[in-house]
Amino acid sequence: MKKWVILMVVVALLTLMKIDFGKKKEGEEVVLESSERRAVFVSYLEYNTYLSGQSVDKMKEKITSMFDQLKENGFNMILAHVRSHADSIYPSKYFKKAKFLENTDFDLLEFMVDEAHRRNMEFHAWINPYRISGDSKVSFTKEDMYPYTWQNTNKIKRIEGKGVFFNPASSEVRDLVKNGVLEIIENYKIDGIHFDDYFYPSNDIDLLEYLEAKRLGKTTDLESFHFEQVNLLVKEVYQLIKTKNNKILFGVSPEGNMENNYQLNFVDVKKWASEGGYVDYLMPQIYFGFENERKPFAKVLQEWQDIITNDKVKLMVALAFYKVGATDTYAMSGRDEWILNDDVIKKEIIMSRNIKNYLGFSLFRYGYLFDDSLKTKTTGKELENVVNLLIQK
């Protein structure tokens, strides 16, 4: 009899507290409705446009609205900048606070992760590992932390017309990048770490390290040395993540142009696609239309499918929503494709779904999908076609 009384009291208390057992709790594992990752990039440009100069409450309102839009339109993964220019959107021991968050104690990363998970969406932390500033003449203060501490060393370099970058061949720089990754995965329940295509900023940024390595017989030519440095960082970051939490994915978004990866960025994507221990997924930026005379989408997609020989490495495709309704000058005879058609992205998603090791796609970027000031005559119809495709699947 006592047991029944206790049970009734518990039920009554739970009813009064209005506990919703169906509501997703913070920290719960995300279980996607579709195995296809349907992602959208949210960059520092969105922060500068929508969050800069706003109160914390207004920032929260905007993020909530953005994530609602993404969820309602069938997307299930957010790729959000947490470090774009040696800064952070969270309290960091190693990097300065992002400019738009100055004079606040707002932990934007924590808020975004929680809001994404409440909507059962994955959250991947997007990092630019080497970029410090797009202005080569920028001055640093103590608040800038490592750029200030290292400004008169070989660990950073000012490149006229490009900006300021960390030296990829510096072991201390690698440690800094890894420490930045570590503090994220230890303090936030993220689903992935994501690097993009900002790798080698110049051919001579690491010349001193190269000459020393060559003197010691540890390398042969400068180009091979560049590849070695990028491979080392990517492999060490992958190992760090898997040691801490094997469920967290690590992906890289290299240029869609395969030649540029090897000739300009020194990114050995073929090695990463064929060997284990580098990435969980590759997300090439295949920002080309079907009628692109130089790099037609179908041909480039096939090139990326062909290099993946390790079944554990998945392929996501980054697509150029920013080109919708615009002239694509470098496409030559196909320069008007994005103006004359309103279903290019839809067709690219359909074609991508047929490749092996397919994981999903991502659209660049949020503003081009939903910001009225960036919309073209075909934006609405292109987005409608994509959404209809997602809702049906």
Image: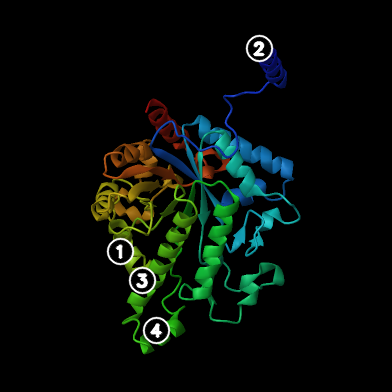
User: Label for residue 259?
Assistant: 1
113 to 270, vertically: above or below: above
Residue 32 placement, left or right of 180: left
Q: Is disc 1 placed on a helix, strand or loop?
A: helix
Q: Earlier in the sequence, mark 2 or mark 3?
A: 2
Residue type at mark 2 is Trp
Q: Which residue is mark 4?
A: 213
Q: Earlier in the sequence, mark 3 or mark 1?
A: 3
Image coords of residue 275 (percent x, y)? 30, 59
Image coords of residue 5 (percent x, y)? 70, 12
Callout 2 environment at 10 Å: few (<14), some (14 to 19), or many (20+)?
Answer: few
User: Is label 2 or label 3 in front?
Assistant: 2
Q: CA distance from mark 2 to mark 4?
A: 77 Å
32 to 85, vertically: above or below: above
Image coords of residue 106 (percent x, y)? 71, 49
Q: CA distance from mark 1 to mark 4?
A: 26 Å
Image point (49%, 31%), residue name = 73
Q: Earlier in the sequence, mark 1 or mark 4?
A: 4
Quarter of the figure with the N terminus: top right
Q: Nearer the viewer, residue 183 or 378?
A: 183
Q: How is the image coloured?
A: rainbow
Q: Which residue is mark 2?
A: 4
Q: Earlier in the sequence, mark 2 or mark 1?
A: 2
Quarter of the figure with the C terminus: top left
User: Is label 2 or label 1 in front?
Assistant: 2
Residue type at mark 1 is Glu
Callout 3 environment at 10 Å: few (<14), some (14 to 19), or many (20+)?
Answer: some
Q: Which residue is mark 3?
A: 227
Q: Specify the farthest residue to the top.
A: 1
Q: Earlier in the sequence, mark 2 or mark 4?
A: 2
Q: Specify the farthest residue to the front.
A: 1
Callout 4 environment at 10 Å: few (<14), some (14 to 19), or many (20+)?
Answer: some
